[in-house]
Image: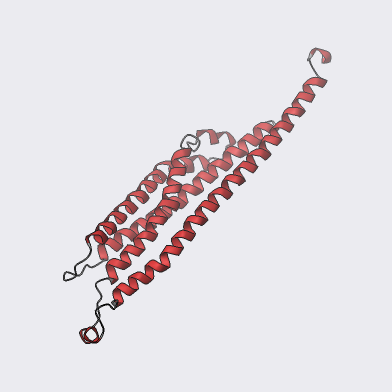
Amino acid sequence: MSLNEHSMQALSWRKLYLSRAKLKASSRTSALLSGFAMVAMVEVQLERGHDYPPGLLIAFSACTTVLVAVHLFALMISTCILPNIEAVSNVHNLNSVHESPHERMHRHIELAWAFSTVIGTFLFLAEVVLLCWVKFLPLKNHPVESTESNSTSISPGKAAAITSTVIMVPSGIIFILFAVHFYRSLVSHKTERVERELDVLVQLQDQLDRGDTLHPTGSHFA
């Protein structure tokens, strides 16, 4: 095997291991967060005597449904593709890398990774805020305290919900900024790596051209 072919084989195997790691991380994250969302929706107890804002209940139901759907979609992609990649990665043969579907399914793998780590995590942050509002909003002041306090005072439940929102909004902004920064850093790293690989290929091509110039035909050695 030539040096050029060996470099291409190493690059293919590196892509395979990276795709396998992304699918494993996506499947674990999606299973954990979607399970938590389902448990939160089932275990939350709505107060029958409290008049919830319709928008709050609609937002909580929609966010939970979209969260579970996004993570289950990422989990489905990981479950379908990961066994095929695992079967190839366990074979101790360099040429078996071409039997893996990670090159053809590259877009699906990146989609599952984005759904699980970016969109799904952002929806999970929103789910926590909505869950705090649904859980704490019915909490009111005690009857004695309510007669002594004026009517414009904020109830403990509403104060707790506002506190969770105030904490989570900066966290969500930091999460978005970190995701953008991480994506840009990753793209720049891939660009630099591709440029280095292209430089190596150019040097190999120059070496091959020099060899062809020194030995133009095989008849000279007959």
Q: How is the image coloured?
A: secondary structure
Viewer-proximal residue among 145 and 61: 145
Q: In this view, does 120 lie to the left or right of 61?
A: right
Q: Which residue is drawn at 61% across and 36% down?
A: 9
Relative to 122, residue 112 above or below: above
In which quadrant of the rendered view does residue 164 lie?
Answer: bottom left
Task: Give the percent coordinates (x, y) of residue 143.
Answer: 20, 84
Q: In which quarter of the image is the N terminus?
A: top right
Relative to 163, residue 113 above or below: above
Task: Give the percent coordinates (x, y) of residue 163.
Answer: 38, 71
Farthest residue in the left direction?
Answer: 49
Q: Is residue 120 left or right of residue 216?
A: left
Viewer-proximal residue among 144 and 66: 144
Viewer-proximal residue among 71 and 174: 174
Relative to 142, residue 192 above or below: above
Q: Which residue is drawn at 41% across and 51% down?
A: 119
Task: Give the percent coordinates (x, y) of residue 103.
Answer: 50, 36
Q: Which residue is drawn at 65% across and 32% down?
A: 5
Q: Residue at x 32, y 49 (%)?
A: 69
How many labels, in total?
A: 0
Task: Give the percent coordinates (x, y) of residue 170.
Answer: 45, 64
Q: In which quarter of the image is the C terminus?
A: top right
Q: In this view, does 52 lie to the left or right of 77?
A: left
In which quadrant of the rendered view does residue 77 lie?
Answer: top left
